[in-house]
Amino acid sequence: MEHSKKQSQDLSRGDNMINSGSTQVSRPHLKILTEDQIFEIKRAAFDIMFSVGFKVLHAGARDMLKKAGAVVEGEHVRVPEYIVKQCLVTAPNGFTLYDRLGNRALEIEGRKSYFGTSTGSPRTKDALTGEIHPTTVKDIGIGARVADACENIDWVMPMGSSQDVPSIASDLYDFEAVVTNTTKPIVFLGYSGRGTQLVFEMAAEIAGGMDKLRQKPFLAVYPEPISPLVQPDETIDRIFAAADHFIPQVPGPAVQMGATGPITMAGVITMITAESLMCLVLAQLRQPGCPVCLSGNVQILNMASGVFGVGYPEMSLGISAQAEVAQSFNLPTWGYAGCSDSKVLDAQAGLESGFSIITQALAGLNLIHDVGYLDQAMVCSTAQLILGNEAIGMARKFMEGIRVDPESIARQVIEDIGPGGHFLAHKHTLTHCREAVWGSKLLTREPYERWKANGEKDMAQRIQERLADILENHKVPPLPEKVLTKIRKIRDAGVKELTAKE
């Protein structure tokens, strides 16, 4: 009898079963384009790269492209398809980002999604007062520390662009502010080729040398060409600096519908594909095998107001479709979500940020940035970041899908309880209750009377309380004083060098 009971328990767990026809977990996913649509966009992108070409403002890059077989007429460069395909062969299908402590953090490949902060805005919504003011280096540090405390924020960009230091050297100040306030991987903008190189030197001091930084990179760079079809001198310098050191890079061509690209979404995706492929060609010709995403930004221009926005559903539709094109090349992708055109933390902020987070997670984009933007990307807000952190947690729970196996189907448990019973005290319930349902840290799930007795706090108030707690209590492992001294020496020398050229 005991043996029979044990055998029944084993069978209910599936310990003795081999079932080659069973899928235990199927995760939700989203697909926008058909294979033939992807084919048409890729063919059009290859065609544009040669028939239209690019304005390349970097003389060294033009020489390199000409030697590779491109047609060069002054600053106008046409890139044949065979060059692009040769470069696609050498480009890695993914890369790994580590944290500042040397631990493996992000595997940028396939459909693995990781969320990061907003960046580059000239204004900041103060973490404590809510006042909107020009971004300072202090704000960048606060943003990084809040991001470090957010369990669903996987990597960090400088939350803004410092306005209280020389603009040509703000990337040096911003990088220092971020790297001293988080251990998470970093993606930074870089405002010049030389500034990018100096940031790499600062990072190398932290990693223990440039070779060790290459082996375990904890940062990536974000070079942005100018649409339509222009490769500026300083952008190419940043592409080359990253390629020379095998530092991952995420090119960011930003095509505005009807302004810097066609008004039609298919045209925008085609433009982004061509421009991102050009960035990849430049990187691979400079240093074959260096890690590069096939990335870009779908931007929406309100034709009535002339103002760019980040909360439109078309943004997520387009960037998800562009990612499918990149995925067809087996290359890493880029997205932007968790942002809003709202000016305050309100229902619009929650609606727009939540929609973009779940849709881009479903689409399987890799590095998804801009959690924390408000006001058409003109304001970085740590409060909006906290809201996005909750939405990402909700999306991640949804993306787990449903496990179907003997343990989760629970035939034996149902048989144990039988008609009219309850499952509250069963061991199966106790074993799985903590992970069966997502537990929010901010959403109210309490009865009305208890909510009222606790102060009738809305979401904005609860977020502000969590922000205050993070700023008072969250500690980030500090860099050794010796390392801090070295990176500040590089920063100060770099600032002097860069500002002397202006």
Image: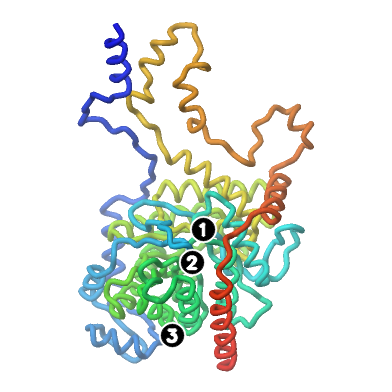
Give 382 or 344, whichever is nearer the viewer: 382
Q: Is residue 346 visible?
A: yes
Residue for point 42% across, 76% down: 209
Percent x, y of residue 144? 59, 62
Q: Amino acid at mark 3?
A: Asp
Q: Amino acid at mark 1?
A: Gly
Residue at image mark 2: 187
Percent x, y of residue 319? 43, 57
Residue for point 67% across, 69% down: 138
Mark 3 vs mark 2, foreground winner is 2
Q: Is residue 302 visible?
A: no
Mark 1 vs mark 3, foreground winner is 1
Residue at image mark 3: 233
Q: CA distance from mark 3 to mark 2?
A: 21 Å
Residue 108, quarter of the rendered image: bottom left
* Nearest to N terminus: mark 1 or mark 2: 1
Residue 408, quarter of the rendered image: top left
Residue at image mark 1: 116
Tell me the number on the disc at residue 445: none
Q: Are marks 1 and 2 in contact (CB under 8 Å)?
A: yes
Q: Amino acid at mark 2?
A: Val
